[in-house]
Amino acid sequence: MFGLGTQELLIILVLVMIVFGAGKLPQVGGALGKGLRNFKKGVNEADDDIEEGQVEEISEEDGNKKKDS
C-alpha cells in the first residue's frame, strides 16, 4: 500500500492523533471518506461521458477565442 510499512503507518497515525485529537478523528475520517467517494464518482461520470461521446472537442481556434475574451 503506497510502499508504506507498519511502522510508517503507526507514525502517521500518532501524528494525526496529535494534530486533530482522538475526539475529532472520526470526523476527519468521515470527511476523507466523503471526499474520496465524490472524487471516484466524478471520475466515473467523466469516463461515462467520454464513452457516450458527450464530451465536445475544443479546437485551437475556439480555445484562442476564449482566451482573447
Image: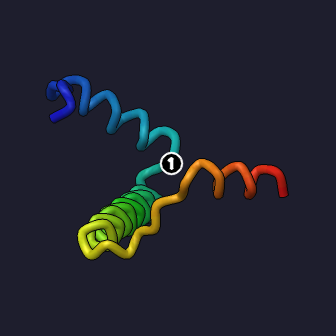
Q: Nearer the viewer, residue 28 or 48?
A: 48
Mark 1 residue crowding within 10 angstroms, few (<14) / some (14–19) / many (20+): few
Q: Nearer the viewer, residue 66 or 9?
A: 66
At horizontal 42% and vertical 33% (from top left) the residue drawn is 15
Left or right: residue 10 versus residue 66 is left
Horizontal and vertical percent position of residue 52: 27, 75
Q: Quadrant of residue 29?
A: bottom left
Q: Residue at x 55, y 54 (%)?
A: 59
Q: Nearer the viewer, residue 10 or 68?
A: 68
Q: Position of residue 43 (x, y in %)?
A: 33, 62
Q: Position of residue 13 (x, y in %)?
A: 32, 38
Image coordinates of residue 11 in percent, x first then y, are 31, 28
Q: Quadrant of residue 7?
A: top left
Question: To which residue does mark 1 refer?
Answer: 20
One can see residue 53 in this view: yes
Up-down: is 21 above or below 30? above
Vertical relation: 60 (above or below) 41: above
Left or right of residue 52, residue 67 in this image:
right
* Secondary structure type for disc 1: helix
In the image, farthest residue toward the right: 69
Q: How many marks?
A: 1
**Quadrant in which the C terminus is drawn:** bottom right
Quarter containing the N terminus: top left
